Amino acid sequence: QVQLVQSGAEVKKPGASVKVSCKASGYTFTSYGISWVRQAPGQGLEWMGWISAYNGNTNYAQKLQGRVTMTTDTSTSTAYMELRSLRSDDTAVYYCARGDHWFDPWGQGTLVTVSS
Amino acid sequence: DIQMTQSPSSVSASVGDRVTITCRASQGISSWLAWYQQKPGKAPKLLIYAASSLQSGVPSRFSGSGSGTDFTLTISSLQPEDFATYYCQQANSFTFGPGTKVDIK
């Protein structure tokens, strides 16, 4: 079955970087884009950006431009999201999701905690 | 940027009730709209795409309608497993609505 499996929880200090992975299985990886969506505690869903697994083209949310980089490794069917200069308000569950317009399925989520 | 709003922000309902949630886009988006269900501690689940197409495996009590700027998600007969938060999403710029929590009356 189609599945996205994400890396484990991270605890980071303010100013550090985090890199979350998302390994896809059950479909042709290069046939779909991958989006990243985050959810702060008790809050709604915030789209962070999208990457084409076919050619690596990216589209980032304006709010995160300059701090986020999304990449893929087609040899391992894995997508990555790196967020730099972390702040306390980056504390959230980070999800990857397959799709170029609507998202299905989603990864299980990765909790990133930013705390000094 | 296209902004998405949802109403109500929360609704209390009973099993068997018909529940309707509205989503509005700040400008026309044709049928580029999706609906998701999220339960506490879980990833969102796609229910409806292209405004009115039911995702495979989703019960037929869920339906979507609308185009342009105004959209609705309807649950025809609320079941215990439907108590959750529902989000709309504009499917071109990917903006999500703020969510509607459906809880037990």
Image: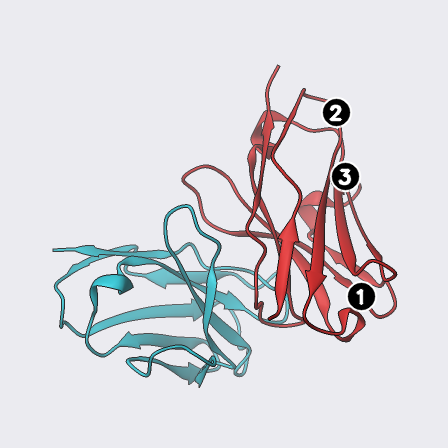
Chain identifier matching the cyan colour in the rendered picture = B
Chain of the residue that carries numbered disc 2 in the rendered image: A
Which numbered tag is attached to residue A53? 1
Q: Amino acid at mark 2?
A: Ala
Left or right: residue B6 versus residue B49 is: left
- What sort of colour scheme is used for the picture? by chain
The first of marks 2 and 1 along the sequence is 2
Is residue A81 shown above or below B20?
A: above
Q: Quadrant of residue A31?
A: bottom right
The first of marks 2 and 3 along the sequence is 2
Chain identifier matching the red colour in the rendered picture = A
Q: Are marks 1 and 3 on the same chain?
A: yes
The residue under the point 29% across, 76% down is: B74
Q: Amino acid at mark 1?
A: Ala
Q: Badge 2: how crowded within 10 Å, few (<14), some, or many (20+)?
A: few
Provide the residue designation for mark 3: A67
Question: Between B38 and A8, which is closer to the camera in this rendering?
Answer: A8
